[in-house]
Amino acid sequence: MDILYLLIPLSAVLVLFIVAVFGWAVHKGQFEDLEREADRILTDDAPVLDADQAGDQGPAEESRRRSSASS
């Protein structure tokens, strides 16, 4: 019975933490435009890269780009 004095406040803190994380995700826009993300996984298109991401391609991506350009 004494364990309830520990478990009840601990569970209340856990629930508050979960609500805070969910509120943060909603505030940062994690749940906006869900349709685009659902459609994105169904397409085979290469992802659009920003200018700062274009130089960070791995060797497999670079060779695939070269082979498609030569065809």
Image: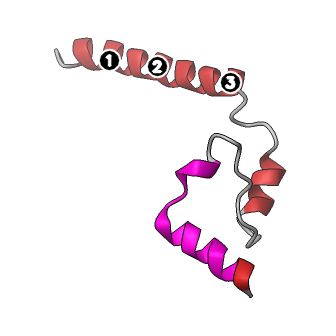
The number of numbered discs placed on residues in the rendered structure image is: 3
Q: Is the magenta stretch mostly helix, strand or loop?
A: helix
What colouring style does the render use?
secondary structure
Q: Name the residue under label 2.
A: 17
Q: Nearer the viewer, mark 2 or mark 1?
A: 2
Does label 2 or label 1 sit earlier along the sequence?
Answer: 1
Q: In this view, does 55 lie above or below 61?
A: above
Q: Is residue 34 above or below residue 12?
A: below
> How far is mark 3 from mark 1, CA to CA?
27 Å
Does label 3 or label 1 sit earlier along the sequence?
Answer: 1
Q: Which region shows up in magenta?
A: 54-68
Q: Residue at x 68, y 34 (%)?
A: 30
19 relative position to 48: left or right = left
Q: Which residue is drawn at 62% across and 45% down?
A: 53
Q: Name the residue under label 3.
A: 28
Residue 56 image position (x, y, % from top left)? 54, 50
Q: Residue at x 71, y 65 (%)?
A: 46
Mark 3: give few (<14), some (14-19) or many (20+) Cα within 10 Å. Answer: few
> How far is mark 2 from mark 3, CA to CA?
16 Å
User: What number is the disc on residue 29?
Assistant: none
User: What number is the disc on residue 10?
Assistant: 1
Q: Which amino acid does label 3 sit on?
A: Lys
Q: Which of marks 2 and 3 is in front?
A: 3
53 relative position to 7: left or right = right
